Amino acid sequence: MKRSTQKILTTHTGSLPRPARLLEMMVSTEMSRLKDDPGFRAAVHSAVAEMVRLQTGNGIDVINDGEQSKANYGIYIKERLTGFGGVGKPMSFSDLEPYPEYYERVFPSAMRMPMGGCNGPVSYIGQAEVDRDIANFKAAAADVRYEEAFMSAASPGIIAHFLDNEYYPSDQDYLMAVADAMKVEYERLHAAGFIVQVDCPDLAMARCEKGFAHASLSEFQKAAELHVEALNRALAGIPPHALRMHLCWGNYEGPHHHDVELKDIIDIVLKARPAGIVLEACNPRHEHEWKVFEGRKLPPEKVLIPGVIDTVTNFVEHPELVAQRIERWARVVGRENVIAGTDCGFASGAAYLTVYPDIAWLKLRSLVEGARIASSRLW
């Protein structure tokens, strides 16, 4: 993983808005039926090429495929693993429950249906799908200039969080089975030459969802420790410098007053193998948490990728504000240890767009311009 040795590098968290044709296909047909459809494959191939062109054209340094083949950053994996024919439990957000009318506006009831469950042995069968993602990205990136490239994959913990255990004798057995299966995808992405980003909202967002909403902090921390153990088990064959992880409190506009604080989980997060830590760092609930690193030294092998662009509002951040945010992080952890990023994805679920697609690109251009301003003052 490159560091910001000559300027502040720029990147984003992963998902980018799908073109209208691809989005229409995703919302009108089940993904299990789409994945082998020639028309869908062609639409994904075209969309990845467009996302790479837009990223490089707007000056993003560390690019990806925009997750164009995935309808959801976490549960896409149901098409790549065996054992997921169960029902599962509905999603819930404890910060929204006291406000049912607003809850319905943010997450309509239809979106809160169970995502599925594990009702059989878990194994990986998605080699063809991940290889197709790799081929699409490599083709799109072949003739453009960029600093580095990454591809995203769901962490064992977020898979186990979204898709409930209905088969294994314990949740720990289930989590480790998922970790062993997901090694295939992670190692395939690494072998293809990409930085592997594992999406780990389970280490933060899960605090106010499902069974953890009413758990004690120590109970949640114990669960997070186990999730990091599973993550490290799955990533054991990949060097830390070839890995980054995304830490997230939920990519939605809500109170977030039940969010676990970064200071209460940072020591757990830093035990994970990935060298890069992509984290929410500019929304109103978490922007202050740069102060955690005033009292907690960043280990020398780690790189922070703080969000300096919000992903749930249509405000376009002023480049000067972006620069100030970058410089604040550079002061506490060192300029070479900062890559400028976004709080989360712009389309974590393909149809869940809180930021209008064209405005998402305006925001990313502001990210690049803010990084340029900060670089001129830091070097």
Image: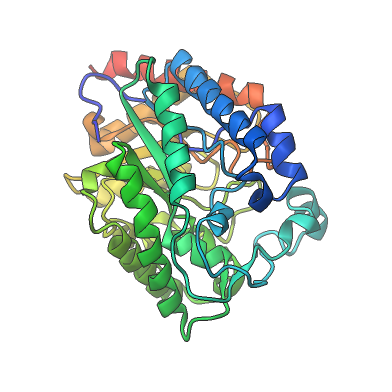
Q: Is residue 207 left or right of residue 1?
A: right
- 342 to 141, vertically: above or below: below
Quadrant location of the N terminus in the rendered image: top left
Q: Quadrant of residue 90?
A: bottom right
Residue at 27% of width from left, 19% of height from top? 7
Does residue 167 lie above or below 375 as drawn?
A: below
Q: Quadrant of the C terminus?
A: top left
Visible in this render: residue 11? no
Q: As drawn, which residue projects farthest toward the left?
A: 300
Q: Position of residue 104 (x, y in %)?
A: 80, 54
Can you see residue 266? Answer: yes
| Residue 196 x, y percent position in the rendering | 35, 44
Residue at 38% from the left image edge and 62% from the top image edge = 264
Tell me: residue 147, above or below residue 150: above
Q: Nearer the viewer, residue 11 or 261?
A: 11
Residue 295 picture location, percent across and down: 26, 51
Residue extending farthest bottom:
169
Residues 346 and 69: in front is 69
Where's residue 167, x and y in %? 54, 81
Image point (37%, 61%), residue name: 265
Query: In this figure, which colouring scheme has been used for the structure?
Result: rainbow
| Quarter of image, res 308 | top left
**In the image, what residue occupies the spot 74% across and 46% down?**
29
Total numbered circles: 0
